[in-house]
Image (cartoon, rainbow, N blue to C red):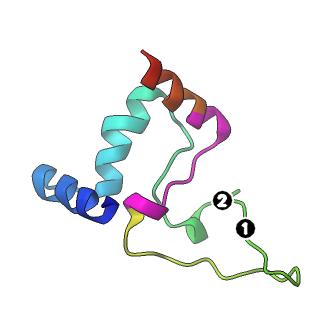
Amino acid sequence: GYLVLQALVQDVTGMPFATWVQDSVFRPLGMRRASYAYLGSLDNASRSFDAGGALAPTYRYAAAGATGLSASASDLIAFARAQLE
């Protein structure tokens, strides 16, 4: 479902999904650290580790809209507050 929604946003707006979300959702809500950028390219992003404690690979999935959001706790609070207004 989110892959279809991501494609719909891109088709209707003519913009990449990540750019549209940044301009239309994150920036207006003051979500300064929220992003759909690839986690492997972000500074200060939490990394994953396997069961043995070794650094796990950072995967890039096809459906960023479904799997690619990274955000700070304060960004998520800003988003939740906006839902209550």
Q: CA distance from mark 1 to mark 2?
A: 11 Å
Q: Is residue 16 visible?
A: no
Identify the residue at image location x=50%, y=67%.
38
As drawn, the residue found furthest toward the top would be 85
54 with respect to 36 (left or right) = right
Give the answer, above or below, for where 35 lies relative to 4: above
* Residue hosting label 2: 43
- Residue 43 falls in which quadrant of the image? bottom right
Give the answer, above or below, for where 21 lies relative to 45: above
Picture coordinates of residue 44, whole percent (x, y):
71, 56
**Residue 21 belongs to the span the image colors magenta:** no
Give the answer, above or below, for where 12 lies relative to 48: above
15 with respect to 36 (left or right) = left
Q: Can you tell which of label 1 and label 2 is closer to the viewer?
A: 1
Picture coordinates of residue 78, whole percent (x, y):
54, 27
Q: Which mark is residue 80?
A: none
* Residue hosting label 1: 47
Q: Residues within 10 Å of mark 2 (few under 14, many from 20)?
A: few
Q: Amino acid at mark 1?
A: Arg
Q: Nearer the viewer, residue 14 or 66?
A: 66
Q: Secondary structure at mark 2?
A: loop
Q: Amino acid at mark 2?
A: Asp
| Tally of marks | 2
Q: Which residues are magenta?
A: 65-76
- Residue 1 falls in which quadrant of the image? bottom left
